[in-house]
């Protein structure tokens, strides 16, 4: 008799992996009986029913440990071992192959010559990563923390200060491995230094925080692009984090990936309800918090803050081919996926249901835009205008494109300095006296970003106010970055 | 079965270092006056520099291009090389 190892594998002989729910496995039961009568050792591992196939001393592999270690993709799988090493393998039922591997002739008399097998339970969606985590080497570098049997994982994350105030998904190995499956980049690759602590951040750390935020693996390319855009020096993420102002990163996603991952640019685009919109922005904030060490009340000194600092992320409506997407306006090739990060907060409404011409609407939107930061502070910050479909339709019917709309808004939001200087209108706040005799633009060219989003009904647009830091234009700017796979 | 998670943080620890004690005297020292770019920071530094001048204490002015960014390493090294004491006009 051949030697047999502790896990039931014969050093010399045959191993079969099977499951009861597989018709081909049931079909080959008489073949297994013939094999068991031969002078060779036979071990049968069952993936689902420990009593299948009946009449054999099967080995229970419902935990799928041996199926994982032998990389079983299909059942039945027949493997021949010699001197403790695998020397041949076949999957499904193929009489010629089974006879070649076993050296036995006349196997499966009465059976068809060929029948494909079924998928191994170890390869069902979401299972493989669990098996890697449990039986293999997950290859993760982050410190492992094991909870007590009765610990609640959500509470454990709160207790460790890892959350933004909302519960997070526990970053288990299986979930992290699935998340890493969403990118071609290596887990140990350094994405950059995360402010404020300038801590090195790996792709794996991004994946861990993306798990916690509730992302799906297919969001990973977007999340990585968002993190990298935030680390562009000209985005000044450190300053944006520690400011006393309201602002945080506002994320606009462009390109076909918005459809692929189901982002929302329509009804309630900046509201609740869409997983991708909400969790991509949240993942960035968790990276800043957990890897960078940026926490409210510590380095984050925002006086009032804003709800968008949990997540402010949406897709642009690109359904009108005549409209130039924001990413294209900012230098990305048409059809490419990209993220744009803007330092902002909001929303402020512009409810105009009476304008019928493009000129009227431009003046009306410009007046609403004048309130950004303060109605008497001009050329001091940027803004993002979220143009709704019904407002856009007025511009479109007049033949106005992005450039024309932006030009008109910049012109219509320019105002006489005498109304704006400190003390004018009985208000101490305002522009320095030197502006009294000049016309002062509310925004500089490039300081007003127009994005299309929103549901089909409603003559309303939204304004995301910018951050005063963007007033020093060569130092702080929005950043647009193409998304890599 | 107990659950295992991975640490989402940078896995770094902070180290508390004692503050450098203030000098007993400013005699012979050069005081760096750093304007971080906030509104009216220069007014504060003007006043401070005038007071230092009255006492015969040397001072040098420095400025960050924007309060939104941390001081560059080059600027910090320059201040460390040229002054023994620094005052930062941190807020407006």
Image (cartoon, coloured by chain):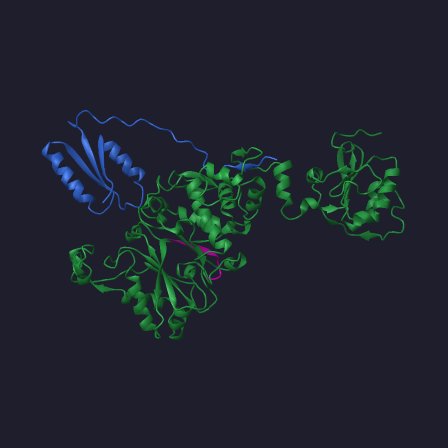
Chain colours: A green, B blue
State the quadrant of the N terminus of chain A.
Answer: top right
Q: Position of residue A13 (x, y in %)?
A: 81, 35
Q: Which residues are magenta?
A: A334-342
Q: Residue furthest left?
A: B54
Q: Residue furthest front?
A: A150
Vertical side of A59 occupied by A391: above or below: below
Q: Is residue A204 magenta?
A: no
Would you say residue A338 sits in the magenta stretch?
yes
Please say whether residue B20 is visible from this viewpoint.
yes
* Closer to the camera in the image, A447 or B39: B39
The location of residue A333, given as percent across then percent down, is: 45, 60
Q: Residue A360 location, x and y as percent?
A: 31, 72
Query: In the visual, does A115 lie left or right of A304?
Result: right
Query: Is residue B33 found left or right of A225 in the rendered image?
Result: left
Residue A47 quadrant: top right
Residue at point 59% right, 38% down? A138
Answer with the quarter of the image where residue A381 lies: bottom left
Query: Looking at this view, is B18 or B37 the one in front?
Result: B18
Q: In percent of the image, x 14 and y 40: which residue is there?
A: B47
């Amino acid at each position: 008799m051949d030697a047999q190892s502790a896990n039931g594998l014969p050093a010399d002989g045959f191993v079969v992996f099977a499951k009861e729910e597989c018709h081909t496995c049931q079909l080959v039961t008489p073949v297994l009986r013939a094999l068991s009568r031969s002078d060779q050792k036979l071990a049968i591992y069952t993936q689902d029913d420990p009593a299948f196939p009946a009449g054999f001393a099967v080995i229970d592999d419902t935990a799928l440990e041996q199926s994982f270690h032998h990389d079983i993709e299909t059942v039945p799988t027949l493997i021949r071992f010699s001197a403790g090493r695998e020397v041949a393998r076949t999957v499904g039922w193929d009489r010629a192959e089974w006879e070649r591997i076993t050296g036995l002739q006349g196997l499966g008399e009465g059976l068809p010559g060929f029948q494909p097998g079924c998928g191994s339970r170890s390869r069902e969606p979401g299972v493989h990563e669990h098996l890697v985590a449990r039986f293999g080497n997950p290859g993760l570098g982050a410190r492992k923390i094991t909870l007590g049997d009765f610990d609640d994982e959500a509470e454990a994350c709160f207790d460790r200060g890892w959350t933004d105030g909302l519960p997070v998904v526990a970053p288990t190995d299986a979930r992290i491995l699935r998340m890493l499956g969403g990118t071609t980049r290596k887990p140990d690759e350094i994405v950059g230094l995360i402010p404020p602590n300038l801590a090195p951040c790996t792709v794996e750390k991004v994946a861990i925080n993306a798990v916690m935020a509730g992302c799906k693996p297919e969001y990973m390319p977007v999340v990585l692009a968002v993190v990298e855009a935030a680390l562009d020096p000209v985005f000044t993420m450190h300053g944006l984090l520690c400011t006393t102002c309201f602002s945080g990163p506002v994320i606009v996603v462009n390109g076909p990936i918005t459809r692929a991952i189901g982002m929302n640019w329509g009804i309630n685009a900046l509201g609740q309800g869409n997983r991708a919109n909400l969790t991509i922005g949240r993942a960035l904030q968790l990276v800043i918090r957990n890897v960078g060490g940026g926490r409210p009340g510590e380095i984050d000194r925002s006086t009032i803050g804003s709800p968008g600092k949990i997540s402010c992320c949406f897709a642009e409506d690109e359904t009108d081919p005549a409209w130039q997407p924001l990413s294209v306006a900012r230098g990305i090739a048409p059809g490419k996926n990209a993220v744009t990060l803007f330092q902002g907060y909001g929303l402020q409404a512009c409810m105009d249901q009476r304008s019928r011409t493009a000129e009227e609407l431009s003046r009306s939107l410009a007046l609403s835009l004048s309130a950004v930061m303060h109605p008497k502070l001009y050329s001091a910050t940027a803004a993002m205008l979220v143009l709704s479909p019904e407002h856009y339709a007025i511009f479109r019917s007049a033949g106005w494109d992005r450039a024309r709309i932006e030009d008109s808004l910049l012109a219509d939001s320019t105002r006489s300095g005498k109304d704006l200087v400190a003390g004018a209108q009985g208000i101490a706040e305002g522009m320095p006296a030197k502006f009294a005799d000049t016309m002062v633009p509310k925004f500089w060219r490039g300081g007003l970003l127009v994005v299309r989003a929103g549901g089909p009904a409603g003559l309303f647009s939204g304004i995301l106010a910018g951050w005063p830091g963007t007033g020093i234009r060569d130092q702080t700017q929005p950043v647009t970055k193409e998304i890599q796979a | 079965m107990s659950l295992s998670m991975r640490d989402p943080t940078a896995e770094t620890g902070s180290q508390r270092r004692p503050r450098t004690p203030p000098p007993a005297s400013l005699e012979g020292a050069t005081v760096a006056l750093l304007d971080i770019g906030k509104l009216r920071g220069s007014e504060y530094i003007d006043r401070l520099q005038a007071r230092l001048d009255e006492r015969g204490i040397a001072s040098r002015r420095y400025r960050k291009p924007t309060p939104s960014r941390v001081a560059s390493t080059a600027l910090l090294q320059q201040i460390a090389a040229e002054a023994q004491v620094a005052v930062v006009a941190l807020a407006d």
